[in-house]
Amino acid sequence: MVIKYKEKKKAIFLRKKGKTYSQILSLVSVSKSTLSVWLRSVQLAKKQKQKITQAKIEASKKGGLARKEQRIKNQKDIYEKALKEIGNISKRELFLMGVCLYWAEGRKEKTWCPSARFSFSNMDPYMIQLIIVWLLKACKVEKSMIYFSIYLHENHKDRVDQVKKYWSKVTGFPVNHFSRLYWKRNKIKTKRKNISENYFGLMCVQVRNSSSFVRKINGWFKGIHKNIGGSSNGRTFGFGPKNRGSSPCPPAQIQS
């Protein structure tokens, strides 16, 4: 095997100038393993080592930036594609979405609390908007029957007006509907991330005289569970029952 003397000499020269392996490989046509053998005995001065280290840091930053830009592009593409997949939402779909959302996040009747009122709490403004639209459009709850409570950490007392205006904008209800404010005690040491200016507390959407309404929602839960093939004994059956169900719920009868 003929050794490439000129290439080896050039590689050693470039290494002593403080070039990285990647930079040398772009100028000398050899494999990385061959280059490693050629350069393993090359001693570098402190200044040369610093230059190589700095070049590696810059290359790493450049690669990281490129990966970040690609990730942002991929996220945008996925988001836009998913957005188009939803399309228009029917009244029945809205009805079922709201039932499932309350099933996950709403207050339910318990044996020790058999007269629970409708109460849905979350920090996510989109969830709050969806549950309000569901109440008004799918369940025909009167707007006057809906009221709100805000749970806020004590260190945000100086932002009360800002918080009320924020939730007023999210819900579409006037600011004077947010008079119920409850304070959450702060911990000196906390791992919470919701301590910045983007924190607006926990919003609780409630409905007056709604214990019967909550019982009805519980029946809807069970209807969904039954019709997807669920059962109390753990056995499951096929999807797609012949009965598509009645039209999305008639006006809710709000009573105690």
Image (cartoon, rainbow, N blue to C red):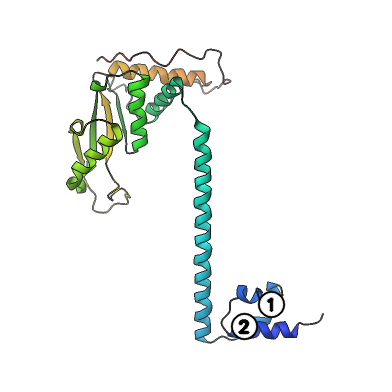
Q: Residue at x 39, y 15 (%)?
A: 249
Q: Position of residue 57 (x, y in %)?
A: 50, 71
Q: Tag 1's secondary structure?
A: loop
Camera-side residue of 202 and 80: 80
Task: For the C terminus, give its image quadrant.
Answer: top left
| Image side of residue 68 versus residue 150, left or right | right
Mark 1 or 2, nearer chain start: 2
Q: Residue at x 65, y 84 (%)?
A: 12
Q: Residues within 10 Å of mark 2 (few under 14, many from 20)?
A: some
- Looking at the image, do the residues carrying marks 1 and 2 touch, with CB atoms under 8 Å apart? yes
The answer to whether 73 is drawn above or below residue 79 in the figure is: below
Q: Is residue 28 left or right of residue 159?
A: right
Give the image quarter of residue 92.
Answer: top left
Where residue 28 is drawn, which disc sits there?
Answer: 1
Q: Which residue is mark 2?
A: 14
Q: Amino acid at mark 1?
A: Val
Report the amino acid beneath label 2: Leu
Instruction: Work out whether 77 lies above or below 54.
Output: above
- Image quarter where the N terminus lies is bottom right
Whole-percent x, y for residue 108 in the image: 33, 24
The answer to whether residue 218 is above or below residue 195 is above
Residue 154 seen by the camera: no
Measure how far apart labels 1 and 2 are at the Cα level.
10 Å
212 with respect to 92 (left or right): left
| Residue name at image x 22 percent, y 31 percent | 174
Secondary structure beneath label 2: helix
Query: Mark 1 Cα within 10 Å, few/some/many (few <14, many 20+)?
Result: some
